[in-house]
Image: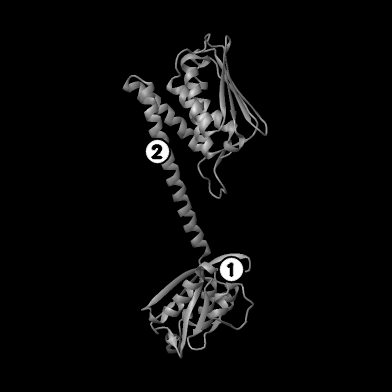
Amino acid sequence: MTKDKHREPLLWQPKNLVRAIEAAGVGLWSWNVDTDALTMDAVAYELWGLDRGRQVNFEDLSAHIHPADRDRVRAAFQATRAVLGPYDIDFRIMAGEELRWISARGKGDDEGIVERIMFGIFLDSTGRKQAEESRELLAGEMSHRVKNLLAIAAGLTAITSRSTSTVDDMARELTQRLTALGRAHDLVRPLPGQDGGAAALLGDLLTVLLAPYDDLGAFSGRIRVSVPRMSVGETSTTTLALIVHELATNSLKYGALSVDTGVLDVSCSAQHEAVTLVWTERGGPKVEAPSGPSGYGTKLLERSVAGALRGSISYNWDDAGTIITLKLDPERLAQ
């Protein structure tokens, strides 16, 4: 009983400590402050991408440190003996063709020195750093999106205030325009693991934006969308949302969507030099070409098509209904 009572706990037995360290992915190192010689365990050699057992010194490891971090790390290691207590240095290395982040940890102020040798550990912090970079990238992207949406909202508020005569009309039209932007935004929100800029399919975008108008008639399916499979970039998605909303609003007020039996057909053809989107209304009231100066809604359409999408818009006021043709720059549409 006495022997068991004073037996060294299993945790502190060297072989078990080694097992725990290996399980945690911790690389061990020691540094002779006089000779600059480094001794590392197998985990540390693997982390640095070096042949196991090779004799190395600090300068040998420095050759693998990313050039942008090398001087900082050299200065930090030389200063560790003046650091009071624990220190932690993060830096990048090149392990072959792979970029890794390493965290070097130890104790300074001679606290960790035994016979002129300092001791510490290396940790692979690549995953943590990549997560931090992803969060910063997402925060920057969200900041950019919010600023863009606020700028658009401010512009829409100014346009809507000039194109309406009552507060109620302004509130209704502005809400509808912002709601259209919200539906478009849902299609291009970032997804986990998504590379590159966000994009939506043109057919999906048109279907989502026009869905609220499809259940207003006497029969379902009065809005038909027939477009080839193509992607629309985030910036163009926002612009198209405004354009489609303006066209649908005009149709709801004066065109095919203003009557229960009216139909709307949206088709598209894509060529190298232009993407042609045709908006065809049938079954509505007889339409005539507008006279007088263009309204603010029309000006918004023309500015959006010509400016943001580097395209053109034309109207055909046919007795059977309005035909609106948009010709868009395919490169700009993908942005």
Crowding near the residue tagged with mark 2, few <14, some 14–19, many ≥20 C-alpha atoms within 10 Å: few
Q: Could you tell me how far apart the alpha carbons at marks 1 and 2 are, in whole angstroms?
A: 42 Å
Classed neighbour count for the residue bearing mark 1: other residues with Cα under 10 Å, few (<14), some (14–19), many (≥20): some
Q: Quadrant of the N terminus?
A: bottom left
**Residue 275: percent from the left, percent from the top?**
63, 30
Horizontally, residue 52 falls left or right of residue 134, namely right
As shown in the figure, which amino acid type bears the numbered disc 1? Met
Q: How is the image coloured?
A: one colour
Furthest-bottom residue in this view: 115
Q: Earlier in the sequence, mark 1 or mark 2?
A: 1
Report which residue position mark 2 lands on: 150
Q: Amino acid at mark 2?
A: Leu
Q: Residue at x 38, y 78 (%)?
A: 83
At 38% from the left and 82% from the top, the residue drawn is 109
Residue found at the very far right of the displayed protein: 271
| Residue receiving disc 1 | 94
Along the viewing direction, whichever of 218 and 252 lies nearer the viewer: 252
The correct choice, above or below, for 78 with respect to 305 in the image is: below
Q: Secondary structure at mark 2?
A: helix
Name the disc covering residue 220, or none. none
Provide residue 262's location: percent of width, then percent of height. 54, 14
At horizontal 56% and vertical 28% (from top left) the residue drawn is 207
